[in-house]
Amino acid sequence: MNQKNLQRLLTYAATAGYLILALVTVAWGVYKRFQVPQAPIVDPDIRGYLGPAMSALTGHGFIHMDGRSFPYPWLVYLILKCFGDFRAISVIQHVLGAGAGVLLLLAWNALLKLVPPGGIPREISRFIGVGPAAIFLGSATAIHFEQEIRPEAIFPFLTILNLYISLLFLDARFVRKNRSALWLGGLNIFIAYLIYLMKPSFGLALPLTTAPVWLSLLLPGQALRQKGILLAAAVIPASLLLFLPEHILKRGDIWGTEFLPETLFSVHASMILEQMEHDLAANDPTPYPRQILQSAHDLLAADLKKAATVTTPKAFDSLGYNPDYLMYNTFCPEFAKMTGWDPAQTNRFYYYYYERVLTKQPGAMWKKIIGQMRLFYGPKNPAYRLGQSLKVADEYARNEELITKRAQIGAGYAPLQPYFQECNALAAKGASFDQIKRLTEWTRLFSAHYMDLLWVAIISPLVLISCALRKHLRWVVIGLWLVYSYNFGNCFTIAVVHSLEVTRYVRIQLIYTVLAQTLSLYFIAEALVYGVRVIAQRRVHR
């Protein structure tokens, strides 16, 4: 057998080995998902996510509720309409979770396709991508999210799909130039905006993760007509299918207009109280009578003291008080009663003082934002849940109470009763989701070294100084910055608006966090292998 045939045989063997390993990993992820009970889990936000479906299924029409955008509730409605069984929600979400693992593998290979030959052989580097896929597919946290009736259940699928489309767009637009870049760019914008509608924490990530498309409109190398088509593909579908329906539906949702201003006011209440004290002491002009301002100040001061002692269901150590307590139990409902204002007037007051803190106390605001960012960019990255077992019995025990009593939805919908019976049975059995020990060890390792690998990404553009390295590694550098921007965009948005101590805000970022870190490791290995080859070739030519 000559060398050429041997090399071809080894390539086939490596490809077959990779496909077998990838299939086994995905199959294992599917098994893990259908090993757990399929009854979905709910939380106190269930009214906004399940309520629209219950309204439609009981003959009252699909409506916008509690400020939750329509795409995810509409998906819940379609599932229940088609299957009439709550377990179908978890089943479909688990299928999408397994699909997210497949998309992660595809995204990894799409990135490798951008890298010219000369470094690690592609037949070997493909195997590296199985690692992050295995961590995501085996994560008890990911499985738990897929079990919930919340948009976090499909968030990983959509974000990794968005990343995959972005990489295909880069290839079609800048490497192997072809017309598919037009529809890929439009699809990238559409999916990114869909993610934002479902999870507003994606706010700053939206322009960052769609930056390749917008930059391509500014860069040369494409005809003006093609840029026009790309712009139309990016804007028109998102406007007609997402923005317009959301705009129409939310007009009848009063709580939807109150949620954001109340959140901003409650989360920044300590700074707002200081600003009120200053305004009262200095007699600074505001749109509000002194009597109203003094009453708001006194009420907020008293309620902040109460909120500082509330540690359930979540203690907010970074803020020093529980903002949810202010929002739902004390200040916000009490202030509305005290003033007698309509929701629009109350919202304007909340926005006014949030904006006043932004302009009058920028140092305090930046201190809060940086403090929140440190919760993610710290010694141990919180995207990884480090325990082996995740108990869900208590969550199942409260499902019926949350839906029927607290949310007061679903009356007359027959499939609710067997669902409640199954939830109560699972609660009695002490249901839990388990994670294998080796996977837990890997998550601890990745959690402890997130910042080390982030620094690799930050300094990676330095390799572009060398002409040889620039030609070989530029797409890896671009890929690194693109993937890490998903983390940064989400975390910065949350830091501005809320608190990163809310665990679901950070743990939902697992899929692209582990991918980003793995890509950093690949960058190091690829740079070393290619660098050694370049040096060896130069010595031979001498």
Image: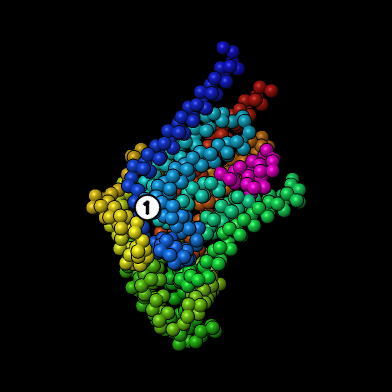
Using the image as rendered, state which of residue 62 and residue 171 is in the foreground: 62
Q: Is residue 119 visible?
A: yes
- Does residue 170 show up magenta in the picture? yes
Using the image as rendered, state which of residue 395 and residue 170 is in the foreground: 395
Q: Residue extending furthest top?
A: 1
Residue 485: where, in percent of width, then height? 55, 51
Residue 226: where, in percent of width, then height? 73, 49
Residue 404 figure quarter: bottom left
Name the residue located 47 percent from the left edge and 80 percent from the top edge.
342
Residue 215: where, in percent of width, then height? 67, 51
| Picture quarter with the N terminus | top right
Name the residue located 58 percent from the left edge and 16 percent from the top edge.
5
Magenta range is: 164-185
Q: Is residue 441 visible?
A: no
* Circle 1: residue type: Asp
Residue 532: where, in percent of width, then height? 59, 29
Q: Is residue 346 above or below residue 96?
A: below
Residue 95 lies left or right of residue 415; in this view the side is right
- Does residue 422 show up magenta in the picture? no
Q: Mark 1 Cα within 10 Å, few/some/many (few <14, many 20+)?
A: some
User: Where does label 1 land, which residue?
Assistant: 85
- Total numbered labels: 1
| Picture quarter with the C terminus | top right
Name the residue located 69 percent from the left edge and 40 percent from the top edge.
177
Q: Main secondary structure of the magenta part?
A: helix
Residue 459 figure quarter: top right
What's the image's color scheme? rainbow
Q: Secondary structure at mark 1?
A: loop
Q: Is residue 254 above or below residue 200?
A: below
Name the residue located 40 percent from the left edge and 81 percent from the top edge.
337
